[in-house]
Amino acid sequence: MTSILRKLSSFVLFLFVAMASFAATNSTGKSISVKGYVIDSACTFTKGLNKPISSQCVQACAKAGSPLVILSDNGTIYWPIADTTPSSGQNEKLLPFAGQKVTASGKVFQRGGSSALVIEKIEASSGQK
C-alpha cells in the first residue's frame, strides 16, 4: 500500500511541477523588437488599412477613445498593454508616434490568435518624424 502511495505522491508532484513550469513560461512573455505603424485599431480592422491615412486622423481616433495598436510590416497587430495591476491604457505612450512608423521593443504575449506587447522602448523608425 505504501508503494502505491509513493507512486501516487510522485505522480502528483510531477504534475504540479509540470503545470507550474507551463504557467511560468506562458506568463513571462518573450522579448522582441517590432517595426510597424502606430494606427487606430478600428481603422486597422474595418478599413483594412496597411498604414495610417494621416497622423491627425490617428490622433483624433485616439482622443475619442479608440485604442492605438502597432501594425507590423508583416501584418501582425500588436495590442499595447501594461503589465501592472490594475492595468492602464497605453494610448498616452503611443500618441506622440500617431501615424508614424516606429520600432518598439518589449515583451510579447500571445493568446487566442492575438499578440499583445508590453512596450519597454519605442522610437520613430529611421526617416520618420
Image (spheres, rainbow, N blue to C red):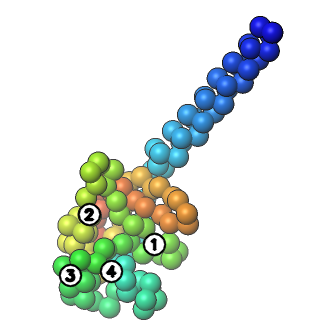
> How far apart are labels 1 and 3 at the CA level?
20 Å
Is 96 located above or below residue 83 in the figure? below
Circle 1 packing at 10 Å, graded few (<14), some (14-19), many (20+), is: many
Which residue is tagged 1?
A: 77
Q: Which residue is mark 2?
A: 89
Question: Residue type at mark 1?
Answer: Ile
Q: Of label 4 and label 1, which has the lower sequence position?
A: 4
Q: Are marks 1 and 2 in contact (CB under 8 Å)?
A: no
Residue at 37%, 78% (x, y): give it: 41
Please say if 123 is above or below 83: below
Residue matched to label 3: 64
Viewport quadrant of the C terminus: bottom left
Which of pointers 3 and 4 lies earlier in the amino acid sequence?
4
Residue under the point 60% across and 28% down: 17
Which of the 4 image quarters holds residue 5?
Answer: top right
Q: Determine the secondary structure under disc 3.
A: loop
Quadrant housing the N terminus: top right
Question: Which percent across, then down, holds residue 118?
Answer: 36, 55
Q: Indicate which disc residue 40 carries.
A: 4
Q: Amino acid at mark 4?
A: Asp
Looking at the picture, which amino acid does disc 2 mark? Gly
Residue mark closest to the camera, 1 vs 2: 2
7 lies left or right of 26:
right
